[in-house]
Structures are given as C-alpha cells and as structure tokens.
Amino acid sequence: MSSFTTTTTPTPSRTLCADLSRCEPGTHVRLQGWVHRRRTLSTVTFLVLRDRSGLAQVVLRPADDQDVPTEETTVEVVGTVTPNPQAPGGVEVTAPVVTALTEPAATPPVELWRPTLTSGLATLLDHAPVTWRHPARRAAWEIAAASLRGFRTTLDADGFTEIHTPKLVESATESGANVFGVDYFGRPAFLAQSPQFYKQQLVGVFERVYEIGPVFRAEPHDTVRHLAEYVSLDVELGFIRDHRDVLAVLREVLAGMADAVREYAGPAVERLGVDVPAVPEQIPVIHFADALALVGAPDDEPDLAPEHERALGEWALSEHGSDFLAVEGYPMAKRPFYTHPQPDDLRWSNSFDVLFRGLELVTGGQRLHRPSEYHHAIRARGQDPAAYAAYLHAFEHGMPPHGGFAIGLERWTSRITRAANVREVTLFPRDLHRLTP
C-alpha cells in the first residue's frame, strides 16, 4: 500500500499596508482593502490599495494577465514585496494575484483618491458612508477616537467608574422647551438632554463617575456650532471643596485627551496638519464680571455672546499663552437650579465655562447637595419639588458635596482640526434639516 503527500504553499496571513515597509524584500504577502486608485499606462498598471492603516502600491504588468477592478471595489492582493523608493513606504507589491471580494463598486460620489476633497459640505454629508473613506475625512474621526481613549484612560486611572444612564426619561433635565418628546408605550417621555440627574445620583454610589453617550437638544439652532444630537463626555465627582476642584480634574482630562491624540492619532494629525493644544498646568481663570468688562459688554449681560468668547480666547492666548480659558461665576439666573451659588455673593454661581480657542467647550461647576437647598431652589423658580421626587430621593439619603462637567466631543474635535463647521467632524450629524443618512 502506497501513500502520497501533497505539498502546497500556505497562504500568508494578512499584512496591513502600513506594515509593508517592514517586510523583507522578496516576502510573499497578502493585502486586503479597497482599490483606492488605478492608473493604466502603456506598459504597466499601478493599483493603489487602501486599508485601515494607509496605502500600498501594487504593480501589474501585461504578463500578469490581471483585470483591475473598479475603484472602491474590495479586493485581496497576493504578491511579492519589492523595493521602490518612489512607492509609499519605499516598497511595492509585484507579480500580484488580484481577487475581487465583491461585485464591481459603483463610481463614488467624490474622487476619493484626490489628496483633498473640494465638494461642498452638503455633498459630503449626503454621501457620508462613502465620503468618510477619504483619508483626510477619516483623520478627523481618528482624532476623536483617540480623544475618547484619553478621556477614559485618564479617569480610569483617577478612580472613576464608567456608567451608562437612560436616554429615555420621564421629565426634562433642565427645561421642557428643549426636549424631544416620544411615545413610550402610550405614555409621554423624552430623549435625555443630559445624564445630569443620574450621574449626580450615582455619585452617592461610586463617588466618581463618567459617561460617554449621546444627548439630545431640541433647540432650533441652525449654526456651525450646534447639533440636535451630539456625544457628551460627562464627569461627576464627590467630596469636593468647590468648583475649582472640578476644574482641576477637567484640566487633567483635557491634558490626557490631548496626549492621547498625539500618541494614538499621530498619522491623522500629520495628515491634517493640525496643531494639538498644549494644556497649561493651570487653566487661566477669569470671573464672569471681569470677562464682561474685558470685552466691553454691559455689566448686566446674562451670558457671553460668540463674539465675546472669541475676544476672550484671543486675550487668553496673548496674555497667558493658553488655548484654554475658564470663565467662572456665571449669574445664578442663567444656570440650572442645581447649581451651587457663590457663597460670598449669591448673584453669582460656583460654575464655569471653559473656552477652547474662542469657543465654549465645557460647562461645569459645583452642585447643590443638601435636600433643603434643592427645595428652596426649585420653589424659587416657581416649580414644585414634588415634580423632581425621583431625582431628590438620593439627596434625602445623604449626598456629598459634588460637582462635574460635560465636554462636547464634536466641538473638541472641531477646535483641534479647526473645522469651520462642527458637522465636518460628526459622523452622521443630526440638525434642523438632516435625519439621514
């Protein structure tokens, strides 16, 4: 009885485009990705392959007898690593076998192979599932993703617990005018404006909590800085002295996010040519009343206008060399009922906004924590504390002095990338006019 042994060449494991330059010349490799660009010359065809890590050049000659799929078709390429100083990373793939992994792709709505996109924002958003494939578009979200990583890492290292709170709620967090109503099994409910009530309650459990999640604002704004749904990075911590303790934690978080962008999104930063901010050891602080005087606004203004924020941002940069400025002591009349007043002057609050390059990025501060203070504050606004019974329940069972803040992820990313419109850095923005894709 005889036996036969069949020897076959094993299929190499997948190599990412960015790793191709580290392969020894002559190595057999397998790439998978999209046909980013194809250029057919008289004696050679260049195929540029794109995957999540970058680009690679594949060279096909007539002797290879290969059909090149249309741009954006997903393919597998098996070939040989060959040095070429003109190719991305100094190497290319020759003698390839190109296999389409799907039907030929339709012509994309924009030319994704071009270094920059010149299409209008409406076109980019209408075709977002495809236009996000462009390396420069992708880079914006890679910066956002790295920021999220830094946010989590910083807080995890500082004893915080990640939480997730309901997005369907029985009542509005701050006011009924800015909420989306929904039918909840025949009962009225709302999409959450923020996790504020729940994160405060959970300070009574974990002391330090944070959440990354969507929030919804039914505000009829049609500006370059507002969205109806955005990602909120919420933090709440207990056993504080006042809002300055909250600001100190915020400073660490912002520094952690900036460091993570440098560490984990370096290629994206380079691709966009952006300058990642240096967060100062102490964020400069100015009182709201002094900020009004500095920008020449009337002293009875209840809030800062966008032009005031821009002027203050320029002042912080020239006076303190800082992209960040904390404005503290906003009028109590302008802050939610749960805000702690400034002890020595009850007109002002122990709260702050942090401006980043002349735009409000963060709102935070110290909260009330005594039940009696809540009852007084709610009645002072003409409301009945009974309407907040579920929220106040935790305070009746002992809550520490606490405070927190919330960062808008899209605003953060837009300020780093210096995008003209926050929608440019939002994967699928929701605003007054857009509910798809």
Image: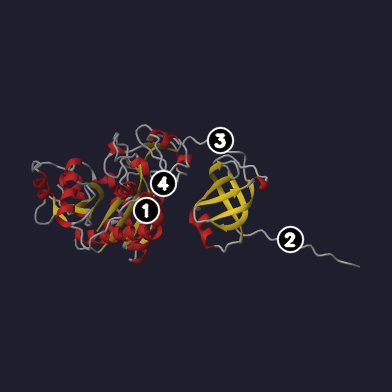
Can you say whether 282 is above or below 338 in the image?
below
Q: Tell me the residue that label 1 is attached to.
A: 269
Q: Residues within 10 Å of mark 1 (few under 14, many from 20)?
A: many
> Is residue 341 among what the camera can see?
no
Q: Tell me the residue that label 3 is attached to.
A: 106
Q: Which amino acid lies under the numbered mark 1 shown in the image of this protein?
A: Val
Label located before the other in sequence (3 or 1): 3
**CA gap, disc 3 and disc 1:** 30 Å
Q: Which corner quadrant of the image does residue 298 belong to?
A: top left
Question: x, y percentage for residue 121?
Answer: 38, 36
Q: Tell me the residue that label 2 is attached to.
A: 8
Q: Residue furthest front?
A: 42
Q: Tell me the residue that label 4 is attached to.
A: 136
Question: x, y percentage for residue 319?
Answer: 14, 55
Helix, strand or loop for disc 1:
helix
Front one among 206 and 98: 98
Q: Which amino acid lies under the numbered mark 3 shown in the image of this protein?
A: Ala
Label located before the other in sequence (4 or 3): 3
Q: Residue furthest top?
A: 433
Question: x, y percentage for residue 253?
Answer: 30, 59
Q: Which amino acid lies under the numbered mark 2 shown in the image of this protein?
A: Thr
Q: Residues within 10 Å of mark 3 (few under 14, many from 20)?
A: few
**CA gap, disc 1 and disc 4:** 10 Å
**CA gap, disc 3 and disc 2:** 36 Å
Helix, strand or loop for disc 3:
loop
